[in-house]
Image (spheres, helix red, strand yellow):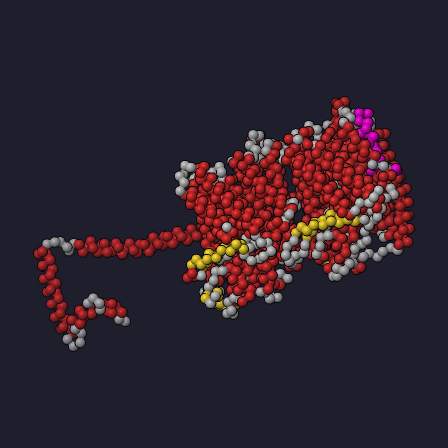
């Protein structure tokens, strides 16, 4: 086969990205007017995208070049004075594999949904949302830089929200979609902080550029912050995004609730693709993870794998068992990458996507048949749903890790990595293989518990059993395809060769002491053989135990629960994480917000108090003005008036009276002058002078005299 | 025509208002038609302006300059640069949309539409004036119609809200007036004392120096202060004046009251345009005229911005009235603008300006959507609904779109702006702690939006609203352009960034030019 030119590869990748987007844009506005509510439109778009992805995959196989890489970029944000921020896509071998996985599962889920969702009142809108998800997920796979990745990262969060809450009339679905969005966003904040640390110090979002600039980064990477190098913080920050999206401890709580969404959605988003995006991210950034950050990653992965497996043991809801199993398997992948098993983690991602999608779609087929999700109402479905049973069994054997199914190879690779880690670092690293194999045994146990409870024995709900019927071809075909892909031979030969761990980009000072090449190869070979044998043993052991508990002695589980009621309740309560989170972050935030609301009324009270003070001041001023200033004015007027009234008494209008007053006045003046002259005859004072001073014009002068 | 494009955009609405004055009261249809035309013409001119604007230049364009009050060197001086272009476009768009959104007003049609057009004149004037005095005149001009629009056409507590809005803004105006007079008497222009020319004042601040006396004597009780303290006082006065408008904590409490009482279209203008006048004023006047004081005050601004972001979001979460929730979300979003301005890196500054445009579009959508449900249900209590997505799917879809745009989902303009502000602010070492706290806003913003959405639209249908009427064509016609803009700006941010980037770059470099190392410790 002739090899594709880089331009063609980039164009094809672009087409894969844009096809579902176009399908979404058309579907969301027109689905009511399209025949069959437009389900064929996104499905066809995904079929074409799948064909292109197959072509790219074939091209990868033909090129057979571990370093294959095509990059295409466009300017996105360019402001004067700041570095250019570009958007771009990168196609390398890992992206080719992921593209195939995503488009394949997405297409099969579209196809399955045409049967499963048939008759739903919002049937067309469902397909629009599925297409939006496919677009966002393909965007994550193809992003060449962290900002673009974050953009699509949030968009898958949106489509996940829309699809979990698709049946929003159910209160549980409405709560679950919000919980999923919020919980993953907690991780996204850490991721954004990590992106900011890297952007500030390297000036770029492009991962290849960041890796390129890290060794010469100088002091920033090793500068300590709270006891750890800054680069370790950047890595842990980015990994927080993966903790959220891949439902790792302690942010795993949203995924089981997300099962409120339609079952095909659980298969696509919450099992095969979106939740694996965290693993993909961790793999992509692994060259910049410092040894401390890698250990953190591995411990988180191991904790998650164990925690979820224990909870899965006691679940009764068929989808909840699968959800916890997904969390547990994702923990495996994360742990593998944390321990340096890049290829092992990604291979488990790929094989898990196939068999877990098969399991979820199979459970969808069961739910479709019996209209119940409760394992206690099933039983004996083997005869009613032979095809579902066969495919489900194959996928279960794969997840349990039985040869020759795919899970055997990938889980073996993961566990071999754990053994190798313990051999390279004797000491507490022993916990990785020890718990790893324990989880493998539990996985085999709870998955076969599920199979035995649902498909074998006698029906526990005769009514539901009698109405059960095998699913239509649109649902059967995806099951068969995925079951076929649960065999191991598909993944052998090329995976380890083409998906090669990138070289570490760490500055010299931050690198771990490396085990010598020959010795490492020896350890890995040894670990590999050990893992093959041990994982076979624990898987068979787990299955046998499940057979004992649920087929041979069905009363045994009840007795075990009776013996350890506290443990059982603790596991049924999912280790009480939900209660804890409801108490602390959720209620604390709500109380804080109510406190802020009340405080804000306090702030407003001050404003109103200022207003009231202004009014009080003005009424005081008004009162003073009325009672003092105006009273004075009125008082003067009143005084004048009173004086006038008094004086009016003299104005009688009788001439005799006036003449009498005149005469008396004249007489008075004469007497006054005579008296004054007699008293002041020795002084220079002249009465005429006094009269002169009082005359108009001179009066003011008199007033001014000191 | 481009010679007088700014005057036309500013005074065409006023012309419309005058025309409405002469129409008889009963001709409601004619009044609305005149108002629509008078608001549409500036929008058409705005499109022309968007095409004709030279993106490479930082200088003011479409300048009109005439002497107005020669005795005081006051000029009629209009011109727009990268800072004002997005605001002018936003004003033209939102004014037209709001006229359409007010179509159902029945009481006092004549007064309502006349005042609305007068308001548009005031807003256009504020964003295009380059003369401080003219700016102040338009600033006050816009206050008057707003007061009556809230006080007459508002809700039950309209008088309280209108007076609170008016007095609060007036306090800010008084502070601005004081500083304006200080600037006038301490500037030199063409051989005479006194200038209101904002560009020249800025030039004087950065290049030729300003107020060379080392000390300034202020009235009792301040006394003698150093020049730099005096400039700081001026900055703080100006800042408070503008902060009231933004509004920044603790001057924000007029906003929820004003929004709750104001009619829908007035809320849209209030949140979409008027709030931006605060941040616009800081960038147009306070920053370039007092760069050294701005640099020293920046940490406080950053703190206020972060308080707005986190506290606003927390308060929003505590609200039960949907409109109050949206009002507090505005407070939170304007905090991002403040943080970006305080950080003052090119990326953060562009992010802040982008956030102004983006918030204008997104919050307008939110308030229009609140109006839609209020028109039908006659209440806005979030807990009083439930499950209405099943009866009004299109309306629920638009609310979801607006909510996700508002909580900063990539693909919408808010994400680009907030990401630029975060990234740009993070590169100021001293601001990293602020940014780290502000990232809580990412979470809280998502929380209160999604929680409100869940309570109103999801779950079992409240039987009271089983017959709730779906959003109608006219309402969709108002919303669709805004939604499209939010997406375009989010996917192709260069459509907006290209307009403002060179002006902001010039602002950034010219301000830093005039500063000594001591001043810019925070900004380095």
Q: Quadrant of residue A415?
A: top right
Q: Is residue A666 above or below residue B27?
A: below
The residue located at (20%, 68%) in the rendering is: A694
Q: Residue furthest left?
A: A656
Question: Can residue A428 be found in the magenta stretch?
Answer: no
Secondary structure character of the magenta stretch overall = helix
Please name the residue shown 79% across and 37% down the image: A356
* Residue A504 in which image quadrant: bottom right
For this view, does A271 lie left or right of residue B70?
A: right
Question: Which quarter of the figure has residue A312?
Answer: top right
Q: Does A503 sit above or below residue A42?
A: below
**Residue A383 colored magenta?**
yes
Q: Is residue B313 above or below residue A130?
A: below
Query: In the image, B125: left or right of A100?
Result: left
Please state the horizontal and vertical placement of residue B192, each as a whole percent of the image. 45, 66
Which residue corresponds to the image point at 44% horizontal and 46% vertical from the top-left? Answer: B15
Looking at the image, can residue A632 be seen? yes
The span shown in magenta is A380-404
Task: Point out residue B294 in the picture as x, y percentages from the top left corner.
Answer: 56, 60
Residue appearing at x 9%, y 59% in the figure = A659
Front in this rendered view, residue A30 or A154: A30
Residue A226: percent from left, percent from top: 72, 57
> What residue occupies the far front of the structure in this picture?
B1
**Residue A206: x and y, percent?**
73, 52
Query: Which quadrant would the C terminus of chain B be assigned to in this image?
Result: bottom right
Q: Quick check: can you spot residue A339?
A: no
């Amino acid at each position: 086969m002739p090899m594709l030119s880089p331009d063609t590869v980039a164009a094809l990748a672009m087409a894969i990205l844009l096809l579902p987007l176009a399908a979404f844009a058309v579907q969301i506005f027109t689905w009511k007017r399209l025949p069959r509510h437009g389900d064929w439109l996104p499905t066809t778009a995904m079929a074409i995208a799948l064909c292109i992805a197959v072509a790219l995959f074939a091209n990868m196989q033909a090129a057979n070049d571990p370093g294959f890489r095509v990059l295409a970029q466009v300017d996105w944000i360019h402001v004067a004075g700041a570095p250019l921020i570009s958007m771009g896509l990168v196609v390398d071998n890992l992206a080719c594999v992921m593209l195939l996985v995503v488009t394949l599962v997405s297409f099969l889920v579209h196809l399955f949904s045409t049967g499963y969702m048939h008759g739903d009142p919002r049937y067309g809108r469902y397909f629009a949302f599925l297409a939006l998800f496919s677009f966002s997920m393909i965007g994550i796979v193809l992003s060449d830089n962290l900002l673009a990745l974050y953009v699509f990262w949030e968009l898958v969060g949106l489509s996940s929200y829309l699809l979990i809450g698709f049946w929003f009339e159910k209160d549980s679905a409405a709560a679950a979609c919000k919980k999923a969005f919020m919980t993953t966003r907690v991780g996204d904040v850490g991721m954004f902080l990590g992106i900011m640390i890297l952007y500030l110090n390297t000036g770029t979002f492009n991962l290849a550029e960041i890796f390129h600039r890290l060794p010469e980064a100088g002091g920033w990477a090793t500068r300590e912050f709270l006891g750890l190098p800054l680069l370790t913080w950047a890595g842990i920050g980015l990994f927080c995004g993966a903790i959220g999206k891949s439902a790792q401890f302690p942010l795993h709580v949203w995924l089981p609730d997300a099962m409120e969404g339609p079952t095909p959605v659980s298969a696509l988003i919450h099992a095969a693709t979106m939740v694996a995006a965290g693993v993909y991210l961790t793999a992509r950034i692994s060259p910049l993870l410092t040894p401390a950050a890698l250990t953190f990653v591995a411990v988180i992965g191991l904790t998650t794998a164990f925690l979820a497996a224990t909870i899965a043991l006691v679940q009764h809801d068929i989808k909840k068992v699968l959800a916890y199993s997904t969390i547990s398997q994702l923990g495996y992948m994360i742990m593998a990458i944390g321990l340096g098993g890049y290829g092992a983690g990604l291979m488990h991602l790929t094989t898990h996507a196939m068999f877990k999608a098969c399991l979820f779609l199979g459970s969808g087929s069961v739910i479709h048949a019996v209209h119940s999700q409760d394992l206690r109402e099933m039983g004996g479905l083997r005869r009613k749903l032979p095809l579902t049973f066969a495919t489900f069994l194959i996928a279960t054997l794969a997840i349990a890790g039985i040869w020759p199914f795919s899970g055997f190879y990938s889980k073996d690779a993961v566990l071999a990595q754990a053994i190798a880690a313990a051999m390279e670092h004797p000491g507490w690293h022993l916990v990785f293989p020890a718990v790893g194999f324990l989880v493998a045994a539990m996985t085999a146990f709870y998955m076969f518990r599920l199979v035995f409870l649902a498909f074998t024995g006698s029906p526990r709900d005769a009514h539901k059993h009698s109405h059960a019927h095998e699913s239509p071809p649109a649902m059967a075909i995806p099951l068969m395809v995925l079951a076929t892909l649960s065999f191991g031979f598909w993944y052998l030969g090329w995976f380890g060769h083409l998906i090669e761990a990138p070289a570490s980009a760490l500055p010299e000072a931050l690198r771990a002491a490396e085990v010598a090449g020959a010795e490492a190869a020896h350890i890995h070979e040894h670990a590999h053989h050990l893992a093959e044998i041990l994982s076979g043993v624990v898987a068979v052991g787990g299955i046998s135990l499940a057979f004992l508990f649920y087929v041979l002695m069905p009363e045994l589980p009840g007795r075990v629960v009776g013996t350890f009621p506290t443990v059982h309740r603790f596991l049924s309560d999912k280790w009480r994480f939900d209660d804890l989170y409801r108490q602390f972050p959720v209620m604390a935030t709500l109380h804080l917000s109510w406190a802020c609301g009340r405080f804000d009324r306090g702030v407003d009270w001050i404003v109103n108090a200022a207003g009231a003070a202004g009014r009080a001041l003005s009424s005081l001023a008004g009162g003073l003005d009325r009672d003092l200033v105006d009273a004075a004015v009125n008082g003067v007027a009143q005084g004048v008036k009173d004086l006038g009234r008094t004086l009016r008494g003299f104005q009688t209008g009788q001439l005799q009276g006036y003449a009498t007053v005149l005469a008396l006045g004249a007489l008075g003046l004469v007497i006054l002058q005579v008296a004054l002259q007699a008293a002041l005859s020795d002084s220079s004072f002249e009465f005429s002078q006094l009269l002169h001073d009082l005359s108009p014009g001179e009066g003011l002068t008199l007033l001014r005299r000191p | 025509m481009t010679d007088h494009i700014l005057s036309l955009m500013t005074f065409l609405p006023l012309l419309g208002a005058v025309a409405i004055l002469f129409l008889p009261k009963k001709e409601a249809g004619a009044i609305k038609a005149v108002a629509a035309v008078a608001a549409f013409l500036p929008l058409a001119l705005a499109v022309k302006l968007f095409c004709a604007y030279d993106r490479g230049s930082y200088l003011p364009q479409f300048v009109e300059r005439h002497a107005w009050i020669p005795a005081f060197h006051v000029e009629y001086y209009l011109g727009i640069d990268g800072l004002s272009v997005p605001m002018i476009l936003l004003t033209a768009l939102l004014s037209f949309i709001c006229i359409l959104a007010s179509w159902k007003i029945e009481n006092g049609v004549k007064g309502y539409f006349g005042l609305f057009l007068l308001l548009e004149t005031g807003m256009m004037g504020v964003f295009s004036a380059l003369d401080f005095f003219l700016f102040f005149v338009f600033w006050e001009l816009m206050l008057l119609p707003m007061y009556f629009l809230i006080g007459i056409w508002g809700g039950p507590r309209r008088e309280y809200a209108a007076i609170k809005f008016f007095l609060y803004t007036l306090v800010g105006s008084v502070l601005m007036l004081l500083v304006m007079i200080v600037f006038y008497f301490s500037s030199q222009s063409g051989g005479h004392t006194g200038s209101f020319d904002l560009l020249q004042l800025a030039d004087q601040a950065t290049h030729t120096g300003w107020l060379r006396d080392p000390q300034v004597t202020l009235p009792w009780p301040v006394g003698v202060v150093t020049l730099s303290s005096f400039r700081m006082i001026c900055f703080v006065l100006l800042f408070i004046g503008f902060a009231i408008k933004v509004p920044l904590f603790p001057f924000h409490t007029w906003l929820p009251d004003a929004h709750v009482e104001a009619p829908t279209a007035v809320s849209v203008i209030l949140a979409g345009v008027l709030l931006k006048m605060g941040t616009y004023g800081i960038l147009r006047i306070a920053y370039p005229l007092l760069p050294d004081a701005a640099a020293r005050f920046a940490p406080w601004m950053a703190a206020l911005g972060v308080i707005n972001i986190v506290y606003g979001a927390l308060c929003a979460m505590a609200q039960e009235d949907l409109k109050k929730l949206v009002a507090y979300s505005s407070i939170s979003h304007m905090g991002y603008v403040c943080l970006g301005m305080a950080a003052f890196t090119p990326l953060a500054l562009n992010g802040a300006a982008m956030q102004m445009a983006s918030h204008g579009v997104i919050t307008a959508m939110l308030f229009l959507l609140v109006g839609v449900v209020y028109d039908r249900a006659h209440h806005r209590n979030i807990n009083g609904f439930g499950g209405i997505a099943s009866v009004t799917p299109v309306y629920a879809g638009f609310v979801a779109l607006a909510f996700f745009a508002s909580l900063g989902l990539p693909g919408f303009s808010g994400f680009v702006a907030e990401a630029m502000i975060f990234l740009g602010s993070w590169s100021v070492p001293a601001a990293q702690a602020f940014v780290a706290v502000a990232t809580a806003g990412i979470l809280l913003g998502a929380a209160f939006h999604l929680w409100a959405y869940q309570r109103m639209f999801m779950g079992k249908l409240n039987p009271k609203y089983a017959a709730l009427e779906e959003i109608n064509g006219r309402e969709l016609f108002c919303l669709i352009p805004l939604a499209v803009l939010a997406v375009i700006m989010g996917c192709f941010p260069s459509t907006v960034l290209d307009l403002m980037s060179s002006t902001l770059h010039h602002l950034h470099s010219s301000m830093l030019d005039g500063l000594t190392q001591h001043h810019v410790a925070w900004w380095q």
